[in-house]
Amino acid sequence: MEAVLDTCVIYSGLYSTEGASFEILSLVGKGDLTPVISNSLIYEYEGVLKRNCKALLLSLEEIDRFLDGICVVGNQVEVSFMWRPHLKDADDEHVLELSVASNNKVLLTQNIQDFKCAVDLGVSVYTPRDYLNKRKES
């Protein structure tokens, strides 16, 4: 299964080993979930993680290794169209565009309200916990 992982999921999963976001990252590590990535999303991950490296208790080198790993296991999708403006937060537009461009059209975020219009574009939006519950039911 593939999914776009919003930056908040990545951050939360690295911040705490408890919770659904960490479980999502564990699925990625096991090869049970493939992150859909783009250059802009990786740059966003990098910026947020490196700005918060002290809170995450990670060195810049550890963040680089983590991002390298995401790039190795991720499915890079080119976004050749733009849906902007579609969301209230312009910084989230590239995440929605990537979700639309991906084959599975699944987006994992903790900010469901920010992406509520995504369903109009055929994107299924889940919190990490809801996604994990859905997987258990299947």
Image: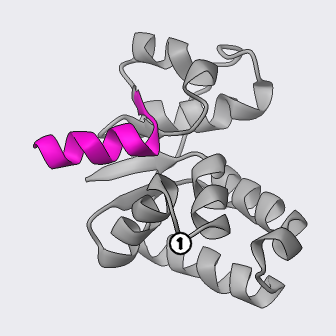
> Residue 39, position in %: x, y?
65, 57
Query: Can residue 131 be found in the magenta stretch?
Result: yes
Query: Can residue 103 be found in the magenta stretch?
Result: no
Residue 86 in which image quadrant: top right
Name the foreground residue: 128 vs 77. 128
Residue type highlighted by circle 1? Cys
> Residue 65, position in %: x, y?
64, 86
Residue drawn at (54%, 26%) of the image: 112
The answer to whether 66 appears left or right of 72 in the picture is right
The answer to whether 16 appears left or right of 107 in the picture is right
Residue drawn at (43%, 10%) of the image: 120
> Residue 132, position in %: x, y?
31, 48
> On the image, numbered disc 1 is attached to which residue?
71
Residue 94 in which image quadrant: top right
Name the foreground residue: 22 vs 69. 22
- Quadrant of the image containing the C terminus: top left
Q: Write down the region rendered in magenta.
A: 125-138
Residue 26 shows in this picture: yes
> Residue 34, position in %: x, y?
36, 61
For the stretch drawn in magenta, what is the main secondary structure?
helix
- Examine the rendered structure and indicate whether residue 15 appears above or below residue 115: below
Question: Which colour scheme appears in the figure?
Answer: one colour
Residue closest to the far front: 18
Residue drawn at (13%, 41%) of the image: 137
